[in-house]
Image: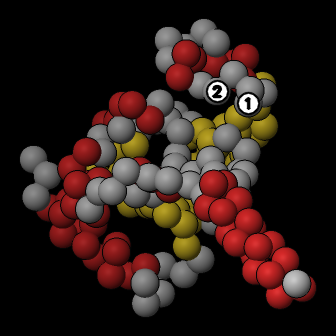
Amino acid sequence: MKLTRYIVSIFALLLATSALACSCKENSEEDLFRQAEYIAHIRVTGTMLRPIKDLYKESYYDEVKEDTPEYISISFDEIEVFKGPNNRPENLREFPFGPGNCMLGLQAGIEYVVYQTKASTNFVTFCSGSFGFFNREGTEVLPKLKKLRKWAKSVP
């Protein structure tokens, strides 16, 4: 009886965890690169929690979850631009990091590669191809940066 209850509890926990997981449309790295209008290696210089009502004046507010009372405004320095230097957003945005919302949890002082499309409205998400790292010479990061540099050379 205890074993059955234990197995049922584990199964319920796994189902609950997968329901909270971020789900993204399957895209290759190359597809994400092609779709993006701006891709840059950045360093976050500051984050500021802002009320969602600040976005009301912007035309895409209908797409913002009304149950989310706040968003985070992110200032940053560019380290390297791979695509769209003329499309640099003034600030980036994300919702407070939480289960299932696909945000990266951007933090001041940390480096990231951010992908932006017109539809992203300056919000940074894991699904866009964006990622963070602590060591740009790391065994996983260095090859990604080299690949982005290679693809950047083919952009007209």
Name which residue type carries label 1: Thr
Residue 149: which quarter of the image? bottom left
Image coords of residue 51 (percent x, y): 78, 25
Q: Quadrant of the N terminus?
A: bottom right
Dots 2 and 1: beta carbons under 8 Å?
A: yes
Image coords of residue 103 (percent x, y): 60, 51
**Colouring style:** secondary structure
Residue at 52% across, 49% down: 125
Image coords of residue 68 (percent x, y): 73, 30
Q: Nearer the viewer, residue 88 or 20?
A: 20
Q: Mark number for residue 68?
A: 1
Q: Is residue 15 above or below residue 4?
A: above
Name which residue type carries label 2: Lys
Confirm whether residue 84 shows in the render.
no
42 relative position to 14: left or right: left
Residue at 70% across, 72% down: 11
Confirm whether residue 55 shows in the render.
yes
Image coords of residue 87 (percent x, y): 34, 36
| SS at circle 1 | loop
Residue at 28% across, 76% down: 146
| SS at circle 2 | loop
Within 10 Å of the Cα at label 2, are there few (<14), some (14-19), or many (20+) other Cα atoms? few
18 relative position to 34: left or right: right
Q: Nearer the viewer, residue 3 or 119?
A: 3
Which residue is disc 2 drawn over? Answer: 65
Q: Is residue 34 above or below residue 37?
A: below
Q: Is residue 59 above or below residue 35?
A: above
